[in-house]
Image (cartoon, grey):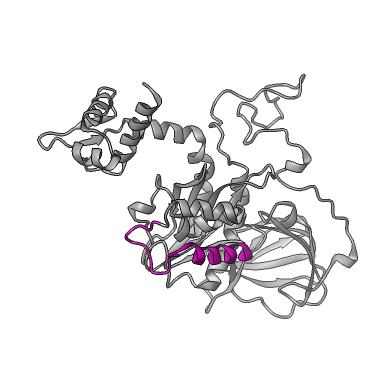
């Protein structure tokens, strides 16, 4: 088969992909500018190889599941299902909105994965033109703006111009109508550091997106991560909060993308000759799995930065939530790209008032008590929880709690994921069960 015939065959497959209910020979040939004789031969070849079926009695042609099966095999081999999908699921669960991943393919951006965080009530589900497997509408989506903002302006505008600024029928009223208006949107995206679409991709929706950059530091974007939901729920404050959340997740994804083969193959070869390949009786390390990423790494590509922070009294400040304590940032936020935060906290005045019931939108929250003691009440946990010197407490992340007492000499280390989080007060305390739990 020559190049022209192969190209025509692929065009037929692409055409039928957009017609799940099938298409007639005449309609297909007119859309692809093919002579009917050639169109018929191409369809016959696809039927012979199992990619297309002709339905009777209407004679329409449609794809079989063979192409879908091949795509699913490739999808599993990329590792998206077990590497990127959990990150999407987590972002969606935290925010209660639709999280989506798109990947760069040449000068196109393709929706490839999603996770719905809204479990009830008003929610946004993408229309067929915006669902997985389809091209992103670059000029009318937060996702498109986030990616194009990483490119030189001349290149970004050329890519958008090539699309003709074609907008699907269900687009919102604020989608850019020409290159001049889109250029202004792109400039705004570069200034804010994230893409926004308000009543653009689809009516009544809003979205924010950030680019996923190569972990190698080469500067190229390999994809985007976005959150979308009903416009009435995504006000400006919430969109900025979501953008900060997406940046954290995008850093995690940058270690996975560009996609590599699924790691469920043969074990990786040892890079340290002479080491035992099987764990000894006191070794709890698993050695029969391939590494989570290609290694070892050079320092400039480390998954977290080198950082040594000595103890200095001058590093303690009272720039924290409570005036009766001082705080020292342990540098974990910067070292991990926002994935982990850490503080050294110590009391400077007597504890005179409970903190009141509140919760933090963290994924994990730990304290290790160096000196003294601290007492909590947690919703759902019976009684008073007291952590004394040497105790390590995993606080149930997201659960309301109240600090009810602490010693005057309290000193502890606090670790939280992610580094940046919000604190939210409860209007009224929950019902509690009295019982003492002592560390």
Q: Is residue 53 left or right of residue 250?
A: left
Please tell me which residue is depicted at 57% across the width and 51% down the height of the picture. 155
Residue 307 horizontal/vertical position (percent): 81, 50
Q: How many marks?
A: 0
Q: Quadrant of residue 53?
A: top left
Q: Quadrant of residue 296?
A: top right
Decide: is 87 above or below 186.
above
Asked if residue 362 lies in the magenta stretch, the reply is no
Decide: is 438 above or below 354.
above
- Assign the C terminus to one quadrant of the image: bottom right
Residue 179 horizontal/vertical position (percent): 49, 62
Residue lying farthest top? 274
Query: Closer to the camera, 331 or 204?
Result: 204
- Assign the N terminus to one quadrant of the image: top left
Query: Closer to the camera, 94 or 323?
Result: 94
Residue lying farthest left? 57
Residue 9 horizontal/vertical position (percent): 33, 30
Query: Closer to the camera, 124 or 152?
Result: 152
* Residue range corresponding to the magenta coloring: 166-192
Decide: is 429 above or below 327.
below
Q: Quadrant of residue 315?
A: bottom right
Asked if residue 186 lies in the magenta stretch, the reply is yes
């Amino acid at each position: 088969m020559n190049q022209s015939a192969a190209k025509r065959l692929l065009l037929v497959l692409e055409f039928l992909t957009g017609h799940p209910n099938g298409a007639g020979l005449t309609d297909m040939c007119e859309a692809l500018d093919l002579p009917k004789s050639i169109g018929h031969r191409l369809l016959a070849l696809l039927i012979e190889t199992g990619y297309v079926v002709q339905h009777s009695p209407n004679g329409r042609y449609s794809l079989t599941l063979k192409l879908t099966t091949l795509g699913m095999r490739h999808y599993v081999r990329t590792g998206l299902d077990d590497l990127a999908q959990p990150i999407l699921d987590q972002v969606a669960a935290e925010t209660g909105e639709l999280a989506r991943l798109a990947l760069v393919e040449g000068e196109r951006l393709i929706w490839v994965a999603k996770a719905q965080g809204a479990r009830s009530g008003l929610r946004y589900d993408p229309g067929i033109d915006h669902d997985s497997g389809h091209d992103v509408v670059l000029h009318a989506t937060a996702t498109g703006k986030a990616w194009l903002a990483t490119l030189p302006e001349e290149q970004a505008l050329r890519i958008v111009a090539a699309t003709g600024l074609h907008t699907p029928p269900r687009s919102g009223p604020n989608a850019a109508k020409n290159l001049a208006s889109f250029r202004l949107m792109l400039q705004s995206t570069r200034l804010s550091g994230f893409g926004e679409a308000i009543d653009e991709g689809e009516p009544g929706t809003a979205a924010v997106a950030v680019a996923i950059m190569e972990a190698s530091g080469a500067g190229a974007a390999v994809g985007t991560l976005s959150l979308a939901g009903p416009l009435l729920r995504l006000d400006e404050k919430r969109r900025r909060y979501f953008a900060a959340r997406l940046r954290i997740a995008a850093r995690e994804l940058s270690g996975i993308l560009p996609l590599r083969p699924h790691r469920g193959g043969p074990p990786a070869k040892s890079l340290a000759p002479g080491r035992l390949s099987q764990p000894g009786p006191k070794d709890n390390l698993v050695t029969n799995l391939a590494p989570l990423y290609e290694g070892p790494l050079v320092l400039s590509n480390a998954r977290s930065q080198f950082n040594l922070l000595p103890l200095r009294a001058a590093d303690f400040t009272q720039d924290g939530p409570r005036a009766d304590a001082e705080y020292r940032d342990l540098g974990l936020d910067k070292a991990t790209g926002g994935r982990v935060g850490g503080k050294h906290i110590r009391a400077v005045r007597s504890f005179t008032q409970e903190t009141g019931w509140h919760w933090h939108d963290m994924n994990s929250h730990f304290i290790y008590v160096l000196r003294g003691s601290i007492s909590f009440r947690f919703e759902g946990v019976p009684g008073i929880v007291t952590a004394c010197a040497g105790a390590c407490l995993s606080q149930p992340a997201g659960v309301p709690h109240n600090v009810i007492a602490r010693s005057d000499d309290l000193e502890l280390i606090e670790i939280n994921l992610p580094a940046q989080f919000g604190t939210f007060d409860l209007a009224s305390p929950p019902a509690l069960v009295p019982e003492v739990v002592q560390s």
